[in-house]
């Protein structure tokens, strides 16, 4: 990718994203995702930690977007826990 330099048009067009540095960060993230064919995840860090703890068996519940999953909601194929609550 070529160097990414903020300009007045970019800052005005995406003013709803926040302050100048937030707009620049959002635009760079979007450009990298598009150029690399990556998907974007807007899930918060706290939610990621809760999900990780659930997936690693550290907790028996996982709440996301108002829905709560418990270990009982999933069937297990072995003694190791293998389940997913976020898709």
Image: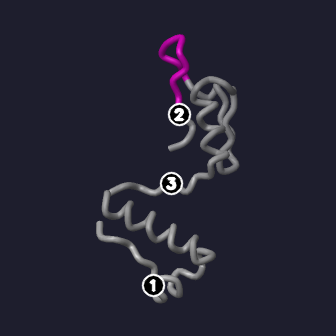
Q: Distance between the residues labelled 3 and 1?
A: 26 Å
Please give the residue where the numbered disc 1 appears in the rendered image: 7
Q: Residue at x 63, y 31 (%)?
A: 53
Mark 2 or 1, closer to the camera: 1
Judging depth in this view, the residue of 32 and 58 nearest the camera is: 32
The image shows residue 61 at horizontal and vertical percentages of 69, 32
Q: Which residue is drawn at 38% across and 60% down?
A: 33
Query: Tag on residue 41?
Result: 3
Query: Tag on residue 84?
Result: 2
Q: Which of marks 3 and 2 is nearer the N terminus?
A: 3
- What crowding class fits label 1: few (fewer than 14 Cα within 10 Å), some (14-19), or many (20 or more)? few
- What crowding class fits label 3: few (fewer than 14 Cα within 10 Å), some (14-19), or many (20 or more)? few
Residue 25 in the magenta stretch? The answer is no
Mark 3 or 2, closer to the camera: 3
Mark 3 or 1, closer to the camera: 1
Residue extent of the magenta highlight: 75-83
User: Is residue 38 left or right of 80 when viewed as pictured?
Assistant: left
- What crowding class fits label 2: few (fewer than 14 Cα within 10 Å), some (14-19), or many (20 or more)? some
């Amino acid at each position: 990718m070529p160097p990414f330099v903020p300009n007045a048009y970019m800052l005005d067009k995406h003013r709803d994203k926040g302050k100048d540095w937030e707009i620049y960060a959002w635009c760079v993230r979007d450009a990298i995702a598009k150029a690399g064919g990556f998907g974007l995840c807007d899930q918060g860090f706290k939610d990621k930690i809760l999900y990780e703890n659930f997936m690693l068996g550290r907790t028996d519940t996982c709440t996301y977007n108002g829905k709560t999953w418990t270990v009982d909601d999933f069937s297990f194929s072995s003694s190791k826990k293998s389940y997913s609550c976020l898709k």
